[in-house]
Image (spheres, rainbow, N blue to C red):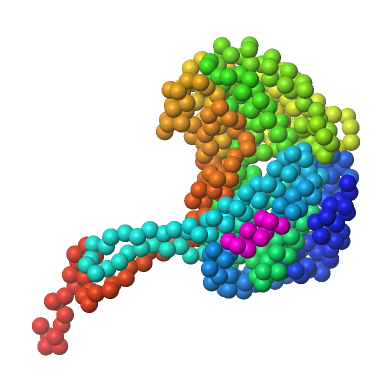
Amino acid sequence: MTVQDIFKKLGLEQEQPGGCLSSASWTSTTHAGVVESRNPATDEPLARVHSCSKADYDRLMAGSQKRYASWRMVPAPKRGEIVRLIGQALREKKDALGTLVSMEVGKIKAEGDGEVQEMIDMADFAVGLSRMLYGQTMHSERAQHRMYEQWHPLGVVGVITAFNFPVAVWAWNAFIAAVTGNTVLWKPSPKALLCSLAVQHLCNRVMEDAGYPGVFALFTTDRIELADHMVQDERLPLISFTGSVPVGRHVAEVVGHRLGRSLLELSGNNAVIVDETADLQLATRAIMFGAVGTAGQRCTSTRRLIVHESQYAKLMPQLLAAYARVTIGDPLEPGVLMGPLIDADAVTHYRAALEEIKREGGEVLCGARVLPRQGHFVEPTIVRAQNHWNVVQRETFAPILHVMTYRTLDEAIQMQNAVTQGLSSSLFTTHLRHSEAFLAAGGSDCGIANINIGTSGAEIGGAFGGEKSTGGGREAGSDAWKAYMRRQTTTINWGTELPLAQGVTFEGGEKDGTGS
């Protein structure tokens, strides 16, 4: 299947005059440069997209502000019903959009389809949420007073996404932002522009039919200065950013300086601990998916394996045998379990990480080759390493798994926590006390802590995000919706007196005009 075939199935014409879209109107800008989308499995071009200009950005921003003024007044359940229609449109286009995700970013078809399913699930969650944007009531200390809190939308929400989840992470933000009354301006990764164009086209068609065009807008560019212009824009009260720690730190500084809000989902350096009681067959399957899925290019990918010394000799033969069965190739081919890295730079980083591991004295147990074929294919790799090495302390966005051993659970938890990142973590055990220790306050310091499942593949019902240099953000489920709203505490005096809080009196000292 060609990209033209996919566009046709999605109802998106092959050529559009530009890469900026709001309502049903594409920009006609052609002077701001061109971004080329390439298939990482072949390194061949898929399509070329005209970038947006600063003038395009300002036009989109003004349109988003205008639509916000009316969208925020639409009852939340009605907003939810419109998001439900988007979810239905995604169901109808799941196969084609999942194929496009696989083709543009290299995920295997099951993962591409799974990402679209995650969007559908997120739409369903948002529909229910639209009737549950609860505040609280509280008792006033003053007679004949009523106190409660309510939540209002922020305005235009800026969403900046990464290539590895080119559509799902946008849905985490956009669908929740929309049902809470905000409009959304999206800047996708320039490595996944076709996915963003397809999704934006589909969503805007639904919004146009529903009579609410302009709730979602798309801003495409590969120019750092334009992305920074977006981050600096005071008209965006919230910037949701997914990406690396250095860029995320810059976003936090810029947005914080203007007293805006930032929602950050940054790097992970996730560990699986396998204790002396663990089910090794269960652990093997979870470790392999966590380390090999998406070619190790997930923020939740398993990067460190911390094994009890009594289990090492039992687990490693099983894990190495599982790795030997991994089929690497075209992600759209049946039976393939690992596709390519995203581009040539990613392959370079993979090579560099392996060279550093060897210099440190690491032992390569399997893999460690760049495959001599078209595209950006590498072998999934397992190395014996030490937790304190610099290369292990960093997030390597590639399928490299660092293995180490431990003696006590306290030691294992300390090793897991001894990195700057704090996203996802996992313990394989059949020991109740071990699992409770891992989940207690002195256990995992990550935003996600799992027992007997891997570090990757979180459900949308829980709040997703991590601590420390992972950024502290929370997206998707639970009460993550509060990030997209502002809290207002309201007090109503329904009596005839004016008592002050804390028993303060402000009477009896007024001047009577006589100088007394």
Q: Name the foreground residue: 143 vs 412.
A: 143
Quarter occupied by residue 269: top right
| Image coordinates for residue 514, horizontal then vertical, percent | 11, 88
Q: Name the foreground residue: 112 vs 425.
A: 112
Q: Is residue 172 left or right of residue 209?
A: left
Q: Quadrant of the C terminus?
A: bottom left
| Image coordinates for residue 507, horizontal then vertical, percent | 16, 75
Q: Is residue 148 above or below residue 347?
A: below
Q: Is residue 471 visible?
A: no
Q: Is most of the magenta stretch helix, strand or loop? A: helix
Q: Name the foreground residue: 324 vs 298.
A: 324
Q: Is residue 487 magenta?
A: no
The segment highlighted magenta reads: 80-89
| Image coordinates for residue 203, horizontal then vertical, percent | 70, 61
Total number of numbered labels?
0
Which residue appears at 53% of the width and 37% of the height? Answer: 448
Q: Residue furthest bottom?
A: 514
Q: Is residue 442 above or below residue 193?
A: above
Which residue appears at 55% of the width and 70% of the height? Answer: 74
Quarter occupied by residue 347: top right
Which residue appears at 71% of the width and 52% of the height? Answer: 91
Which residue appears at 82% of the width and 69% of the height? Answer: 28
Quarter occupied by residue 160: bottom right
Q: Is residue 82 magenta?
A: yes
| Image coordinates for residue 94, horizontal then vertical, percent | 74, 50
Q: Is residue 23 visible?
A: yes
